[in-house]
Amino acid sequence: MADVVDGAKIIVTTGTGGVGKTTTSAAIALHGARSGRRTIVITIDPARRLADAMGISATANEPSRVDGPWAGELYALMLDTKGTFDTLVTRYATDETQCRRILENGFYKNIAGALSGTQEYMAMEKLHALAESEEYDLIVVDTPPTRHALAFLDAPRLLTRLLENRIYRLLMAPRGLVRAVNNAAHLFIRQITRIVGAEVVDDAIAFFRAFEGMEQGFTERAKTMIELLRSDDTAFVLVAAPRADTVLETKYFVGQLAASHINVRACVVNRMAPVFGAVRAKATKGLPHRQAVERLRDAAVAEEAHVTDLIDGLGDIAIERVPMLASDLHDLEGIAAIEALLFGAPTGRSGPPAK
Amino acid sequence: MDPAQFFSASRVVIVAGKGGVGKTVVAGALARAASRYGIATTILEIEGRCSVASSFGAPSFGYDEIELVRADKGAGQATIRGRTITPDLALVEYLEDHGLRRVARRMAATGVLEVVATATPGIKDLLVLGKVKQLEQTRRSDLLVLDAPAAGHALSFLDAARVLHDTAKVGPIHHQSVEVLAMLRDPARTQVMLVTLAEETPVNELIETAYRLEDQLRVSLGPVIVNSVLPALAGIDRDPAELLAAALPDAQLSSLRAAGQWWSTRYARQREELERLAEALPLPQIELPQLFSPTIGVEESIQLSDALIRGVTQLDG
């Protein structure tokens, strides 16, 4: 695991919901900082206590520094989807009028706030911006929980796909022209208008008119981002739990990633039943402690069958099993405990606190 | 409370919770429990990867309904069916029912649903809820159990009807949202059952979801289902050496101590979380046991439905 993280500039953690992706990402980032690197972790929706521990808030959309006894530096950032999108528009708009027209448009507000895939898209844009800034040695991205591993891969293409839609092209043409060029299309648009209302259609038209001239930049950035994700500097870490349904979904993820030429370099299986040494003495029969040992062991054996099923398809990559802890601490101490399990105790490696 | 009365209190039960808490498994156990009281139940899956099928040892299913458990009148057992609802198919169906077959076909072919969905967030959710409402009105089943999207999404999913009701003032979307809201807000028709684990993060999320569902959407909430609760083992918090008559090899004794400590710590943490939940949210809780099984098949599903029925029996009438 340490080799994978030490050899990468970008780590992307991916997996289904509820498997401990955020904690795993934080532990990886902590390892990065402890190895003397300037590290940042981008999280989507951390548990409140974790966010407090790392001093991050949703509104800032700026990295906040986490101080501690490590040789490098640790920063955390909670993704503000709408804020990131606004920044993009502001930065790439050709002039102030265009920028304002987009930011105030109802259709844009819908996209920026609620469109599924926008969160993934903005996570990638943020990653891209941070990677370009070259301010960090290691960037850890905690992806949003999703059923589709490719949601964030497809994300950069989200807007360009919409922009390339033929219906949009028609919507964008002046109304008179639409009528002249394509009566059927006009009728179709009218039918849609009847269903969703004129306001919605007008907003959409206004948005795409306002957006004109910016598509090129978005398309190009989308390409760069996909290349960045496929590069040797980027390592994907799969996070899973040893349950049958989760393993099934995770395997589906792996297939999707492979089809997009993205290689998974490590797999972390969280929440494994802890195993304690065997107890056979007759005198212990009926003891609750022995029951605990045996039930947990049976669970672990059953779980291992699913883990084997999962890692068989992954090839020769780093596999880490993390036992379910007696107490889930969502603070720096808890993250350090997970870090120690993933990377071994941080003895000798931790240096003096950074200035 | 009488389980028969409990399971027939509303015609739609929406099971919602954070990813990984086991809401699909709970949806399966709930359907099983209700059907045992002669209530014909249909499980509705939304995200299309019907993992509930394993609770019934059935192959995965799709938009077309399949039978998961056969009715047995003599034994008082009603049927359980399963199907999925997808927005695309629900839209096509809706438009066809409203004499817009050609538009439906064209919208599907040109990918314009994506366009419309972008322009009107929530429309896909409204289409799904509209389909649920239509199924509810056919009364083909006594009870519909809806396996809702994961929590953060569950809120926006259920809230879609309210948001669209406020934005679309006229037309078919407005009409549909009015009817869906009426269904969601009538306790005799709809009830939301929230699922959590006895852990900090899912409990926090559940509390937030519960208040927003009640305040914003004004739906009625059923008891909270707490999944995977560690069973109490009497004496687990004591030093095993004290409980033993004979001496034990050191390795075995320390193994017992470590396991005992793990169990009692985790158990105590879970109780703390459930107390915190009870203080923050005045809803009854029903606990389902940690089964120590990575697979939920027929046998495990029956165990969970038994536990659910026991929990219901202990609720105040």
Image (cartoon, coloured by chain):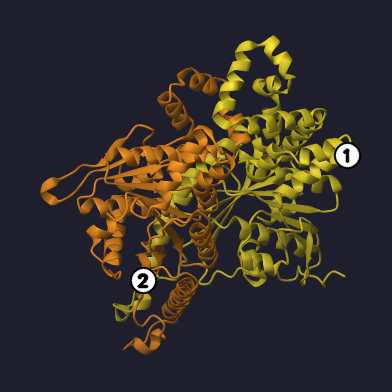
Chain colours: A yellow, B orange
Q: Position of residue B272 (x, y in %)?
A: 48, 76
Q: Nearer the viewer, residue B253 or A243?
A: A243
Give the residue drawn at x 61%, y 63%. Answer: A47
Q: Nearer the viewer, residue B142 or A143?
A: B142
Quarter of the picture holding the C terminus of chain B? bottom left
> Quick one: B78 or A97, which is closer to the camera?
A97
Which numbered tag is attached to residue A96? Answer: 1
Local crowd size for mark 1, using a 10 Å CA cut-off: few (<14), some (14–19), many (≥20): few
Q: Secondary structure at mark 2?
A: loop
Residue at horizontal 41 percent and vertical 60 percent from the top: B221
Report in which chain the residue with disc 1 lies: A
Dot label at residue B231: 2
Q: Is residue A181 toward the left or the right of residue B269 in the image?
A: right
Residue A35: in sight, yes or no?
no
Identify which amino acid the numbered label 2 is placed on. Answer: Pro
Residue type for callout 1: Glu
Specify the farthest residue to the front: B170
Quarter of the figure with residue B42: top left
Pointer 1 with pointer 2, Cβ within 8 A? no
**Does any portion of residue A96 appear in the rendered image?**
yes
Decide: is A147 above or below A171. Answer: below
Tell me what residue is drawn at x 54 percent, y 37 percent: B123
